[in-house]
Amino acid sequence: MEVTVSNPARGTAIINLDIEGPVISRHLYGHFAEHLGHCVYGGFWVGEDSETPNEGGIRLDVVEALRALRIPNLRWPGGCFADEYHWRDGVGPRAERPRMVNTHWGNVEENNHFGTHEFMALCELLGAEPYISGNVGSGTVREMSEWVEYLTRDGDSPMVRLRKANGREEPWRVKYWGIGNETWGCGGNMRAEYSADLARQYATYCRDHGDNTLYRIASGASDDDYAWTETLMKQISCFGCEATPKNFFQGVSVHYYTLSGPWDAKGSATVFDTDDYYRTMASAARIDRVLAGHSRVMDVYDPNRTVGLVLDEWGTWWDVEPGTNPGFLFQQNTLRDALVAGLHFDIFHKHAERLHMANIAQTVNVLQAMLLTDGDTLVRTPTYHVFEMNKDHQDASSRAVHLTGDHLHRTVGDTELRTLSVSASVKDGQLLVSLTNLDADRPAEVAIDLRGGSIGTPTARVLTADRIQDHNTAEAPDTIAPRPFDGVTATDRGIALTVPPHAFLTVRAPIA
Ligand code: AHR
């Protein structure tokens, strides 16, 4: 696109400091680790005998990098893998654990060395809450029920005795519990009605043991399949099964991936042109409509908004890197991926009331990863830095942003893509504003018009690069990393800055 000084992109973002919006749950910054490629094996887990520094087999460099993001939760063991995973194969002495074939992901042998105890140890090291995805597709109600008992029950019972025999005396606390995954597809190819009935049945036997209270998440829709959500929501209430009516599940999931084209022509993670880039951004922006659509359906059946929408898989999906196993979903991660993440977070913040959780797919070495490992090396991706720069939105009070301006749109196919995205929150007396300029060529002059309060001196950081295709490698790990941004000024109305093209930027300021 031709850029001239006669058509500068200009925006005014009005933020009312004194009007509190919904709290942005920290769980919107959640993560996902599947037994897929090198996410678990090689990514999180190297085994106790590895030369790579580890604690009980868990890679310490990965833990250290993720702790800096304050990751709130980790979903495991799948994805599609969850519906062929049998938890009993993953407890007890490692050498004696049965093996299986991971039929979804590369047809490789799974040795079950990373199981329940290893996952819970990982969560403890990360300071993250576990989110366990139970097997509906090829499991049984009894198997899932016993897994909950094994993890969370205190006192004495068959599963408690088994846990203790395996070395863990105290029960763990587990809140987030997934009932199946993509039951419309890899999780059993079910119809919505059948899946909803199974969700009720499985949820019934996933008990709250002692004071451990589960948040049960029913396997939900893909993309804009609002009919699936409606079928689930119709089945959510358990009237008459208790003195007080309650819901069978506390959350329903949805999955949405960002692509630049059809599934059979996803394209390269690093070799793409500006048209591919804008198509990607239009696809990413569609998550707003998708979340709004599911929320509207949920409002009909749950007007008090007690049930959570859980976007437990999101992110970009490209062709695998040349020469890698097609079943391992290993992809590079460029500035384009980072801007997709920035845009998603602004949209998540807007939906903070209904959206209880979101989990990027996936944390290490798979799809839109935070970290890429190769042997002992570890690379932080551009997406990692967006999570880090945005981490203070976690548990903050959102502020609505009213954005107006000129030349802030671009036509992409049948979509009008807004090229500037902004969100804001307040926590501990600090204002945090995130801005993503999606325009590949043009800077955006932005006036942040603050009403109902005032601020002290603002500071800012920016994440950008010369090219939208730029990325980090072991040889050049900091090509894309946040840098201080000194082009931010306090004005009598608030803050003024010019966001560079293809950039993600955060501004923070103390509330005066
Ligand atoms: O994240 C990769 C896969 O994508 C998951 O296993 C599945 O749930 C989804 O289709």
Image (cartoon, helix red, strand yellow):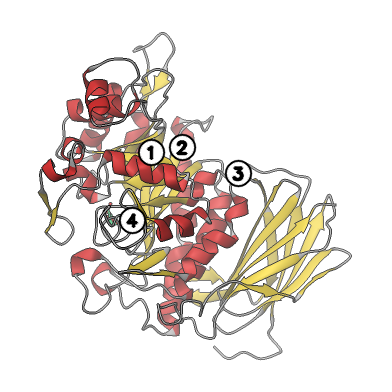
In primary-sequence order, the first of circles 1 and 2 is 1
> Can residue 228 be seen in the rendering of this structure?
no
**Residues under numbered marks 2 and 4 in contact, where contact means CB atoms less than 8 Å apart:** no
Q: Which of the two discs, 2 and 4, sits closer to the camera?
A: 4
Q: Amino acid at mark 2?
A: Gly
SS category of the residue bearing label 4: loop
Residue 308 circle label: 2
Rendered position, 324 above or below 79: below
Viewer-proximal residue among 16 and 318: 318
Q: Is residue 241 above or below residue 314?
A: above
Q: Amino acid at mark 4?
A: Phe
Q: Which mark is residue 44?
A: 4
What's the CA distance linking mark 3 and mark 4? 26 Å
Q: Earlier in the sequence, mark 3 or mark 4?
A: 4
Task: Estimate the spatial distance between the alpha carbons at disc 1 and disc 4, rounded to whole Å.
Answer: 28 Å
Which of 368/237 is in front?
Answer: 368
Q: Secondary structure at mark 3?
A: loop
In the image, is 498 to the left or to the right of 178? Answer: right
